[in-house]
Image: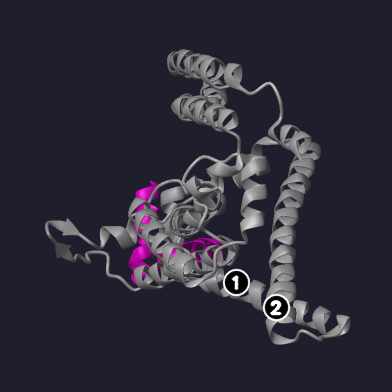
Amino acid sequence: MLTQSSALIKKHYPDIEESRWADITAGIALHPENYSPQLVEGLKAILQDDWQNKIQMLGYEGTVNPERILPAVILFNIPPGCRGLILIALLAASMSTFDFMVNMTAGFFTRDVYQRYIRPKATNKELIYATWVFIFALVGTGFLFGYSVKSINDIWDWFIMALGGGLVVGNTLRFYWWRFNGGAFAIGTAIGMIGAVLIRVVTNNLPDDAQFMFAGIDLVWFLVDPRGQFLLTMTIGLAGSIFGTYVTKPTDRKVLEHFYQTTRPFGWWKPLKNCLPADVQKRMKKEHFYDVLSLPFAIVWQVTLFLLPMQLIIRSWDAFFVTLAIFLIGLMGLYLFWYKKLPATNYEEEYERTI
């Protein structure tokens, strides 16, 4: 039934893209008089009773549209009073996240870019206007960007894998490499983000059957597959971060020493090790060893912690008890190799007693 309905719509609109599918189905359901009578009658014959609600659950591939399931559950299965509370909670969560990100980004632009480099002597009134202009430009760009989005899954893959891959290197190296500095973070992050945006632009114009083989490897995979996008943008971000590290000056030695003495980080900090006593260095090395040893247990514990409630809700009992056993193994490993090995004193308190 769903496959036939999808095929009928595509027959009347052969050039329809997935990003426009929701507009077409909503238009047919709400204003059938604006569409071909043959199309409307055909859908009525296939979907029969309540066809206008059914068509809005229809996905581009001829299956149930997963993005419509939650709205349908709220509309048809939640009592009126609870329905309003759920909608208010969802809207509040959405708006709070949206407002926070927009305001935070606007603040960064106004203070760190506009006031620092463009107009250092700008008045408060001018800064407010600059913030408004940037917010309008940012939100407008977001709406325009939305027209290239085929589905929530499509944009989610790009945000998490492509864009996330471009940002992960800078956010990681700052804790593990003494030479990495603020300039390198900015340059590496910018290059990684530019790489992610270019991947998005290129993939939107690639034909579905595109291939480019090199040494037996299809290089197009790195552009279209989320895993390939992550690896590609992470490599681009790494190259940008290393480049930025060596074209900018190192962080002030006193700042590095204070960070090292209070944080005791793991990684490439050899030039700063002599600023700590030998006994403290020995304790640090032991703690870092157990941190690395407990990492696999932490990953297992974290993943199974997400899986357990889902398996409980869908009543997948066999999978639930297997996951529970794995969860307990991860928890026991964390207790033995991490919790029991924690230092008796806080590093910062210990540092304050030595100065």
Q: Can see residue 51?
A: no
For this view, does 290 lie left or right of residue 88?
left
Task: Please give the residue where the numbered disc 2 appears in the rendered image.
Answer: 134
Residue found at x 27% / y 69%: 207
Q: Main secondary structure of the magenta part?
A: helix
Residue found at x 67% / y 44%: 75
- The crowd level at tag 1 (other Cα within 10 Å; few <14, some 14-19, many 20+) is few
- Count of residue discs: 2
Name the element at disc 2: helix
Segment tinted magenta in the rendering: 1-28
Residue 120 lies, with reference to residue 64, above or below; the image says: below
**Closest to the observer: 75 or 303?**
303
Residue found at x 60% / y 34%: 277
Task: Please give the residue where the numbered disc 1 appears in the rendered image.
Answer: 143
The amino acid at mark 1 is Phe
Marks 2 and 1 sit apart, C-alpha to C-alpha, by 14 Å
Residue 1 at x, y = what percent? 38, 46
The amino acid at mark 2 is Phe
Residue 69 at x, y = what percent? 55, 43
Residue 55 lies, with reference to residue 248, above or below; the image says: above
